[in-house]
Image (spheres, helix red, strand yellow):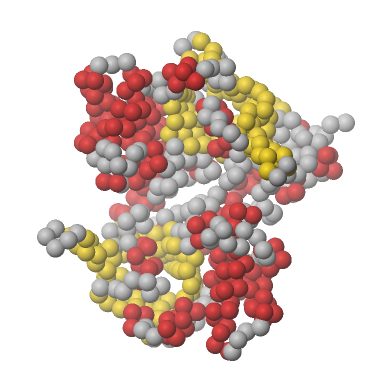
Amino acid sequence: MSLILDVDHVGKTFVQGGLLSRRQVEAVRDVSFSLDAERPEILSVVGESGSGKSTLAAMVLGRLVPTRGRILFEGGDVAAIRSRAGRRAFMARVQPVLQNPFEAFNPLKRVDRYLFATAANFMAGDGRPTRAAIEERVDRALVEVGLTLAEVRGRFPHELSGGQLQRTAIARALIPDPRLLVADEPVSMVDASLRMAIVNLFGALRDRLGLSIIYITHDLATAYYISDRILIMRKGEVVERGPARAVLDNPQHPYSIALKQAVLTPDFG
Amino acid sequence: MAEPVLIVDRLKAYYRTHAFGLDRDIRAVDDISLTVAPGEVYGIAGESSSGKTTLIKTIVGAIRPPLAVVGGSVRFRFGGEIRDIYALTPVQLQAIRWRHLSCILQGSMNVLNPVRRIRHSFQDFAFPHMGLKPAAFWEAVRAHLARLDLDPAVLDSYPHQLSGGMRQRTTIALATVCTPEFIVADEPTTALDVIVQRDVLTMLRDIQRRLGSSFLFVTHDMSVHATVSDRVGIVYAGRLVEEAETPTLFRGALHPYTQHLVASLPRIGDTTRRASLPGRPPSLADPPSGCRFHPRCPLAMEVCRETVPALVEAAPRHRVACFAVSGAPS
């Protein structure tokens, strides 16, 4: 069994304050999980604000170095990547999707420039790519998310709807052919009808492209709907884990039960 | 039924821009009529850029160019006296605000001054309207905070020292300290996580019962409406397309857009596939002809492309604007 991602007893401590008033905050405490290469899945990480979800995501993405433990991606330690080439190869395999699509794109820049720049960046290995090859690659990524280059070409972010923009952000992440997407609250800023469109898209990407996705959210209902496994975090620790439906149908930890009870249900008698 | 507190009659508000000799109207609120009864929580739902926020801006009279009210009226009944909000002078409007009509806005960080203690926000917003001596005013504020289970120590904190949920509860305390008859809440819980959201909603519902105020509650989240609203109006592209009491709306929605909104809600314990609506939200600058929903509607007929359906009463207290329900005009 080969692992695509192996998070091994990882912890992160932030130090606040100066020399005299030093205070330590343990954002993540002893978290372990792994993703199997043969079985692509959507792993939900849920918890309230301040539970360490985003810190965990930043460590998987290699943006923060864990204080304890280590994160292995395809067998290599993420924190040990030093060279530019190594970093680039890692980034081609692990891509982020951010929370707010309106903030992810510069409002004064055309959206397609990000797509072309990403494609040019990751195709540079095989000599200088031609314009046609870049456009072909960008178009292929956009078709995966249900858009076409013709719809996006030359547009500014304000000319696209929130849903189109979030799809474009996901398409951008798909350009380097990643194995793993880390989506940090990708639907908390979009409204209800778009939310399902994005979540359905994640399901389709898993089934069609064999992508593994770490889906960070505080929305238990979409986590239940789409994910295969779930980790429930509280104050940096995993309090409950398991198959998403089994855990949410019958939560055991008091915190998981409280979370489930806080979900507003749209049901009437 | 009691006389309504708020009567919005055929309200139209457009963003009017003139650039390069081109006039452009963005019809953010187009012919909306609704009433809110005393003690009622009226929910407004709709997707982003459907004109929800513009609607409440025009209702509270916060109109700045390029937004302009093109037609219709908004009338409040405060203490048996009817006030047309557009006929008031700025001074009269100032006197109504906070005392009778107050707001809870989305970003609590934007409401509270980040560089001053919260006590100053209370002083700025509420003191001029309470008509009390300073000592009595602070006494009233403390009593109000205690009623909302907030520690009076928040008065001496800076906004950044409070958590997101505490800040939002403080803005709710700020909006309700003068016991206004009418409160407008714009996405008050959208930025909060599930547990905090539940607390804030419970607190809002509780305070609404205690004060007997009417609420206009705007959010895109249908499950929030299911929890707090007595009646819900669905806004699509600047028009009200359906309005009914909350249980009716969730059990027997008539408009295809509302049916989609209700059906697309994910629920724990239910894994049936949820479809997402095809197409994109219409542009308010150039809305589709006829019924604005027709390009995305599964039931669209020929007449929907040409004629705008009127909002008609399909059942008692259930209004809907759809030809598939009311029948095409002959």
- In the rendering, at what x and y percent does residue B54 appear? 57, 36
Q: Residue at x 24, y 20 (%)?
A: B134
Whether residue A200 sits left or right of residue A82 in the image: it is: right
Whether residue A191 sits left or right of residue B174 in the image: it is: right
Q: Quadrant of the C terminus of chain B?
A: top right
Residue most extreme to the bottom: A127
Whether residue A39 sits left or right of residue A27 in the image: it is: right
Q: Quadrant of the N terminus of chain B?
A: top right
- Please tell me which residue lies in front, B253 or B236: B236
Q: Vertically, is B228 above or below B97? A: below
Q: Quadrant of residue A160?
A: bottom right
Q: How many marks?
A: 0
- In the rendering, at what x and y percent does residue B125 appear? 36, 28
Q: Residue at x 29, y 73 (%)?
A: A66
Residue most extreme to the right: B330
Q: Residue at x 37, y 33 (%)?
A: B172
